[in-house]
């Protein structure tokens, strides 16, 4: 039963993950990936800093031990010299005291030498680790720079993809049905052209009917009557009409008839 529940849970998790990846904004996911990479780089820097700090501390301990070793070596030499001088003077008590002090310095000198050797080994190891940590940080920094540059490229590609998808949807809506309540561009164009052609056909047929010709005759008669009325008003005012002015030059320019010539007597 538990095995079946575990398999079902993994299936549901995979299904929800796939659904989430389909619906998630790639730009947000890209920002999340870059943020995660930056966090990992920051943690790597912190770890590398701890390794380098350990190397520095080991180096400082070794330097102190080396200084202590030099002091102990000098003190042991001094104690041996003073014990020898006291023994030569016959001062057995001081000779024993100085000898005991020299032995104590010698014991501390041996312990310090062992510590120095141990610290040298530790320093060698910590130096190698520090160099590896520095190289890892430098390499990861280069990777981060590449990722940031690739991020800008991917952002541009994503914006272009969104623009192209929007353009594809706009172009598809011109030739495909997008819904029962929304006509396509082709349907609207065919409807407008049909109405326009029908209007032109109706107008052409109406222009050839008898009624239209009768209206033209009536309009011509009205125009003639209006012209005659205007000529009468001009005559009353002593103004030559436009028609008489047009005929006058023609009458003047008409040549006089030549006299008849009778038969010669």
Image: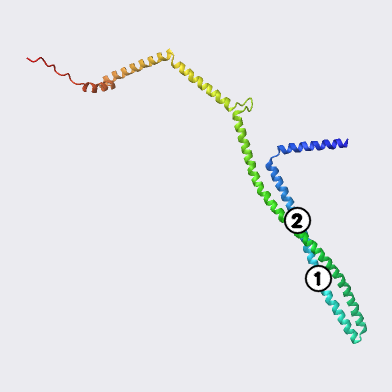
Residue at the far front in the pictured view: 264
Q: Distance between the residues labelled 2 and 1?
A: 30 Å
Q: Which quarter of the rendering shows the N terminus?
A: top right
Say above or below: 85 vs 210: below
Say above or below: 68 vs 15: below
Instruction: Name the disc covering residue 66, or none.
Output: 1
Left or right of 82? Residue 177 is: left
Image coordinates of residue 45 in percent, x first then y, are 74, 55
Image coordinates of residue 17 in percent, x first then y, are 76, 38
Number of on-image labels: 2
Tell me the residue at 84%/66% (across/down). Answer: 118
Q: Where, by quadrant of the figure, is residue 67 drawn?
A: bottom right
Q: How crowded is mark 2: few (under 14 residues within 10 Å), some or many (20 or more)?
A: few
Q: Is residue 239 visible?
A: no
Image coordinates of residue 206 in percent, x first then y, are 46, 16
Task: Give 79 or 122, whichever is nearer the viewer.
Answer: 122
Tell me the residue at 75%/60% (across/down). Answer: 131
Q: Residues within 10 Å of mark 1 (few under 14, many from 20)?
A: some
Instruction: Name the disc covering residue 46, or none.
Output: 2
Mark nearer the N terminus (2 vs 1) = 2
Image coordinates of residue 124 in percent, x first then y, are 79, 63
Task: Give 227 or 89, whichever is nearer the viewer.
Answer: 89
Q: Is residue 106 visible?
A: yes
- Label 1: element kind: helix
What coloring was used for the rendering?
Answer: rainbow
Q: Which quarter of the rendering shows the C terminus?
A: top left
Q: Where, by quadrant of the figure, is residue 208 drawn?
A: top left
Residue at the far bottom in the pictured view: 89
């Amino acid at each position: 039963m538990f095995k079946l529940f575990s398999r079902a849970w993994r299936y549901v998790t995979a299904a929800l993950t796939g659904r989430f990846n389909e619906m998630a904004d790639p730009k947000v996911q890209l920002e999340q990936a870059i943020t995660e990479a930056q966090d990992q780089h920051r943690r790597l820097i912190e770890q590398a800093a701890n390794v380098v700090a350990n190397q520095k501390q080991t180096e400082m301990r070794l330097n102190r031990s080396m200084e202590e070793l030099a002091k102990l070596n000098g003190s042991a030499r001094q104690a041996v010299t003073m014990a020898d001088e006291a023994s030569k003077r016959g001062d057995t008590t001081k000779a024993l005291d100085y000898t005991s002090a020299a032995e104590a310095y010698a014991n501390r000198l041996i312990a310090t030498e062992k510590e120095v050797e141990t610290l040298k080994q530790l320093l060698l190891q910590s130096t190698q680790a520090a160099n590896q940590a520095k190289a890892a940080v430098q390499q990861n920094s280069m990777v981060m720079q590449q990722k940031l540059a690739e991020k800008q490229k991917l952002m541009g590609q994503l914006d272009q993809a969104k623009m192209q998808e929007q353009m594809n949807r706009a172009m598809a809506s011109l030739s495909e049905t997008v819904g029962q309540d929304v006509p396509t561009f082709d349907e609207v164009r065919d409807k407008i052209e049909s109405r326009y052609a029908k209007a032109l056909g109706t107008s052409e047929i109406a222009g050839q009917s008898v009624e239209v010709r009768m209206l033209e005759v009536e309009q011509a008669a009205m125009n003639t009557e209006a012209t005659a009325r205007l000529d009468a008003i001009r005559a009353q005012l002593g103004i030559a009409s436009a028609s008489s002015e047009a005929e006058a030059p023609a009458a003047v320019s008409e040549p006089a008839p030549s006299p008849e010539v009778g038969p010669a007597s």
